[in-house]
Image (cartoon, coloured by chain):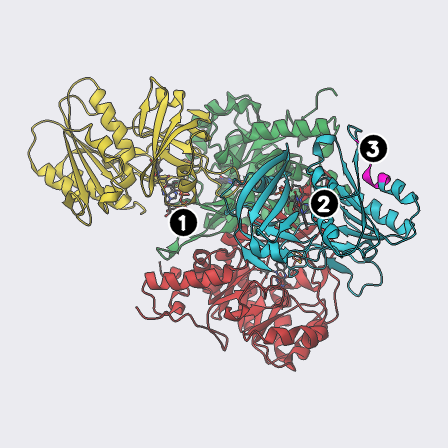
Chain colours: A cyan, B yellow, C green, D red
Amino acid sequence: MFNLTPTVVSREQVTPVHVRLRLSAPEIALAALPGQFLHLRVSAACDPLLRRPFSIMLTEPATGLIDLLVQVVGRGSEAVAAAMPGQSFDIIGPLGHGFPLAPSGSQVFLVAGGVGVAPLIGLAEALAEAPGEREIFSLFGARTESLLCCWLELAERCVEFTAVTEDGSIGETGLVSEALARRLQAPFPGKRVIYACGPMPMLTAIAAIGREADVETYVSLERWMGCGVGACLGCVVPAAAPSVERYLRVCKDGPVFPATALDWEAMPR
Amino acid sequence: MFNLTPTVVSREQVTPVHVRLRLSAPEIALAALPGQFLHLRVSAACDPLLRRPFSIMLTEPATGLIDLLVQVVGRGSEAVAAAMPGQSFDIIGPLGHGFPLAPSGSQVFLVAGGVGVAPLIGLAEALAEAPGEREIFSLFGARTESLLCCWLELAERCVEFTAVTEDGSIGETGLVSEALARRLQAPFPGKRVIYACGPMPMLTAIAAIGREADVETYVSLERWMGCGVGACLGCVVPAAAPSVERYLRVCKDGPVFPATALDWEAMPR
Amino acid sequence: MSAVDLSVELCGLGLKNPVMVASGIFGYGTEYADLVDVSSLGALVTKAVTLEPREGNPPPRLCETPAAMLNAIGLQNPGVEVFVTEKLPALRDFGVPIIVNVAGATLEDYVAVARRLAETEGLAALELNVSCPNVKAGGLHCGVSPDLTAELVATVKAACPLPLITKLSPNVTDIASIARAAVEAGSDALSLINTLLGMAIDVERQAPVLANVTGGLSGPAIRPVAVRMVWEVARAVPVPIIGMGGIMTARDALEFLLAGATAVAIGTANFVNPDTAAEVLKGLEDYCRRHEVARLSDLIGAAHQY
Amino acid sequence: MSAVDLSVELCGLGLKNPVMVASGIFGYGTEYADLVDVSSLGALVTKAVTLEPREGNPPPRLCETPAAMLNAIGLQNPGVEVFVTEKLPALRDFGVPIIVNVAGATLEDYVAVARRLAETEGLAALELNVSCPNVKAGGLHCGVSPDLTAELVATVKAACPLPLITKLSPNVTDIASIARAAVEAGSDALSLINTLLGMAIDVERQAPVLANVTGGLSGPAIRPVAVRMVWEVARAVPVPIIGMGGIMTARDALEFLLAGATAVAIGTANFVNPDTAAEVLKGLEDYCRRHEVARLSDLIGAAHQY
Ligand SMILES: Cc1cc2nc3c(=O)[nH]c(=O)nc-3n(C[C@H](O)[C@H](O)[C@H](O)COP(=O)(O)OP(=O)(O)OC[C@H]3O[C@@H](n4cnc5c(N)ncnc54)[C@H](O)[C@@H]3O)c2cc1C
Ligand SMILES: Cc1cc2nc3c(=O)[nH]c(=O)nc-3n(C[C@H](O)[C@H](O)[C@H](O)COP(=O)(O)OP(=O)(O)OC[C@H]3O[C@@H](n4cnc5c(N)ncnc54)[C@H](O)[C@@H]3O)c2cc1C
Ligand SMILES: Cc1cc2nc3c(=O)[nH]c(=O)nc-3n(C[C@H](O)[C@H](O)[C@H](O)COP(=O)(O)O)c2cc1C
Ligand SMILES: Cc1cc2nc3c(=O)[nH]c(=O)nc-3n(C[C@H](O)[C@H](O)[C@H](O)COP(=O)(O)O)c2cc1C
Ligand code: FES
Ligand code: FES
């Protein structure tokens, strides 16, 4: 875990509301695992006050570069997305636990909702580079075609890529969780693993689908954060029954959890 | 009085801590009188919260351009000084009462301390352009030579310009108020008027000098401001005895006051 | 969807909309007239009026703090007589309900001001400032005690037939008990919150920034405290509440309405953006359309049903 | 000028410097160990410890507000036994004074925790959390009453010989009276302030943001209230004060010291900048040099002589 002020080396406006930032952060590029995140300071003033968490999308250990994908939803993300090359950010990271890599021979489903695609791109890369073979399917859901940010980055790392839009503007029509359920109906003799990142209702649906299909499922959650390092207990979610702790910290115990570790009934929106 | 969002057309770093901004604000350029000021919003966030007052240095009614001179002392002035061409500011103005122009035939002393030079440059211009003749002397005090921001703008509008530095790095050594007192020793048969803008201790000294020499003296004051338009009563200074009001508002009754209108004993620093 | 009904009913006053300007912010209305369409406000609350003229506190009277400001104006005002004869006529011309904020040092002061205002045409209501934290006598001391508050409210109510709004101080352990006392004594509505008591120190001079040492904290920083108090008071009393404290946007105003306020007042935000009231009103209307709320008054207290 | 003496004396504890980390911010010390040189702190205050383990409040537990945040963690902790056996050893290794923040639902709870800590090696002091605003029983209700505060202080003092620091709630009408009650009952020092009680509403969902409805407001927004309370309490009682509430910089810390605090604690600022304590310490040293102050302790309360 480092506290650094890396510099932005490039900025790409991916969609009207998504920006891809490339930062020079060799320590992070070397240390980060797919699914881990950074805690960014978004203002030097007292408002907005708290840092904002952003996933590490991709790392390039050789060059020391890392990529973030930022969706503008409020003032903090707006400030991050507005960063120009040369500007630097105060960051803490890499934070949290990333995705465990599925063993060789397994069939993998990467299920992204909106900007939740970011950590799954890094995961696709890591799965592809890991020793052994895996069949990687990806499903990317969004409201409409123009919000399928960086979809090519995901598609090119998978054997099959499916776009799912609510308005049917491209790919399958409907919810990405429904598309996943359809995919899982095709039988597969070996091990299957689902990895999902996106809005909470999507993750809840996918946890249920994974449970029903008896497929190992990992979800990456988003919660407001204070410290980002596990100290303040502000970012917790309810743990499933056998846990000793009633609550788990998204920043430290997550953001990636086995879906079975969580109490989805008590999960706040 | 307008609420506008003029655009910065140019920015000049005058000294390491002073920036001259040119804004396109035709309404202000037409309406403003020397000594009036603008109330600028310095942040879209809640911190820093309040607007900051800045004098109008020069106006060019023909082109609709106005100049501000900004000294960086804290976060608000830093944000203003950092503005780049193309950026726009939320301003209210022109505000307050400006300097009354000395009648034709009089000898005028413009006494500036630091960034207090800004409104005096506009005043020098107005005095020079006003019908009739006036002998305009200016004295500009600063800690050291490099802080004599925009001095040429002042000097070129006067018959005599005197720099005064505390460290003697250029011009006379000492305080600008002492230099003024020396100038006033030379007798002059006609009317004399002193106009001063700068830090409070300087203004206090000049008010005393003006009173002793029996010379009409106007001072332009700086106070923290809330509304800037006379409503909140937050920016007051104590009035001299014959006034009906104990306190006068710098934003509305000033920022320019006859020195005799103020209670200098009770004046806060 | 057809037009949204923005009107609200506030202790007998039918306001065309719920967005007012808080006491002490707009002076007596004329200073902002160049910048703001005062006539579009739901109501205007005046700066505090006392029996005799007050010169107010010595300067410095204000300073900025994170997302907030401290003020210690100290009730500077020309006194009720000058207010009625010289200030009120211009105020009346705006054609909006005028609520007069009333302050005093003694019970007799308050009663005298209330009597004088009772004789005056064209006032909508009195707002009883039992909570001004900057004046030692009458201000803070009264507003922090349920009994003193009740006595003051009952006495002023008897002296003046106008609707009476009591403005509560947030510097108390239990705001609901003060609210209950005011309402039981006859207050027709409540305003909350006034400023939080705070101070700042000039570390270079090693002395308090404000000549008065302490001052009242206002602005967005205090909004969570204000919303919480409106929430608590809305559960404790049946009368309408005017919510205020750090409202900068329509979203902020909605927090107060959903917490149980019938109207909202804009304070410090006016200094930052004189258009705040107009923008809040516009934003409330947009919100109602988006949420398919036909009458804005349906939102009042809605968050209590969560 | 020679080195500045940064040490302060806090109820028998000689602290090498006055900059501590506030309760609830650093957990039990280890989470931040990668980022912060914990051993350079003046002292470290733990998250609240209760007799039995507590699961805390349901989420959402925090949200941001202007220049501040609301939290409703709700005393989640593993209980005193696990604290002593599993958490404390790592904490002790930092080599800084450890102050344990103690909370409870009943007097008996507090006493049991205090007894257990009295038997424990390597603790510097207890900080009595009479003011946690998020738990209905024991928390807020005790800290707002002078009598209950006094009873609690006296009982815990009798149960544990360690220096006792009472942490006061700011959600009271008269902080000085509570402070006096705590000191008369035997409190060796006071900490102030804990969080202000606030709330936020999610206007889209029309419901409170926090599952607990209300939460504690912390961060720079509350600093003026905190400084004012330290100022008032410093005039009311002779014991040392640990000042906190919104400290982000050395300048902010100086406000507290000049208002009468002997030490300061960094809370929310750690989330924004984990280096805050180190930067504050550095800034205090620079200030002393610039103002030719040989001992930082000479600054304590200096603004009262203005
Ligand atoms: C582990 C983790 C990884 C993330 N990775 C990414 C990423 O790669 N790219 C990306 O664009 N976003 C990511 N997010 C979400 C991102 O942190 C929020 O969008 C951002 O903090 C919003 O800040 P804001 O100031 O722009 O919005 P605000 O103005 O604060 O809020 C706008 C909206 O965003 C929601 N929101 C605010 N803060 C958070 C938060 N911390 N977590 C979840 N929702 C929040 C609020 O409910 C509100 O509706 C991630 C969040 C987490 C927890
Ligand atoms: C009528 C008027 C005209 C002015 N004209 C100019 C001008 O032409 N150019 C220029 O550079 N400055 C001018 N000033 C001063 C300018 O307003 C302040 O320097 C600025 O507001 C400081 O804001 P900040 O956020 O940078 O500083 P802060 O961080 O707020 O404070 C830094 C220092 O500035 C002082 N300060 C802060 N606000 C004010 C204020 N409103 N008035 C006086 N002192 C303050 C504080 O005491 C502090 O020591 C003028 C002030 C007034 C009242
Ligand atoms: C400069 C100033 C003057 C004020 N004067 C009064 C007053 O005379 N009477 C009163 O009841 N409240 C007064 N207030 C309090 C406001 O009416 C309001 O209750 C408070 O500022 C909180 O709202 P805000 O955060 O939107 O400013 C004043 C506030 C400020 C900032
Ligand atoms: C997330 C969080 C948890 C806290 N937990 C405790 C606690 O367990 N016990 C306590 O006495 N104070 C607790 N506090 C209060 C702080 O110790 C401190 O008094 C308060 O936050 C004000 O300081 P600040 O503005 O610097 O944060 C907590 C504060 C926060 C933000
Ligand atoms: S954000 Fe502090 S524990 Fe997760
Ligand atoms: S700043 Fe409000 S009256 Fe001058």
| Figure check: A247 above or below A177 | below
Residue B196 spot, x, y in % from top left: 23, 36
Task: Please give the chain letter of the residue carrying mark 3.
Answer: A
Residue B4 spot, x, y in % from top left: 46, 25
Residue at the spot of label 1: C210
- In which quadrant of the rendered image does the N terminus of chain D lie? bottom left
Residue B247 appears in the rendering: no
Q: Amino acid at mark 2?
A: Arg
Mark 2 → mark 3, Cα distance in angstroms:
49 Å
Residue A244 spot, x, y in % from top left: 80, 66
Task: Please give the chain letter of the residue carrying mark 2.
Answer: C
Q: Amino acid at mark 1?
A: Leu
Q: How many marks?
A: 3
Q: Which mark is residue A172?
A: 3
Image quadrant of ligand 4 equals bottom right
Residue stretch in magenta? A171-179
Mark 1 → mark 3, Cα distance in angstroms:
65 Å
Q: Amino acid at mark 3?
A: Glu
Residue A175 in magenta? yes
1 or 3: mark nearer the eye: 3
Q: Secondary structure at mark 1?
A: loop
Q: Nearer the viewer, residue A70 or A252?
A: A70
Instruction: Name which residue lies at 32% across and 33% down.
Output: B254
- In which quadrant of the rendered image does the C terminus of chain D lie? bottom left
| Figure check: C12 above or below B48 | above
- Count neighbours of disc 3 (C-alpha within 10 A) and say few if under 14, some if 14 to 19, many if 20 or more: some
Q: Kindly indicate whether the residue at mark 1 contacts the one at mark 2 (C-beta within 8 angstroms).
A: no
Q: Nearer the viewer, residue B84 or D41?
A: B84
Residue A16 in magenta? no
Residue at the spot of label 2: C235
Q: Secondary structure at mark 3?
A: strand
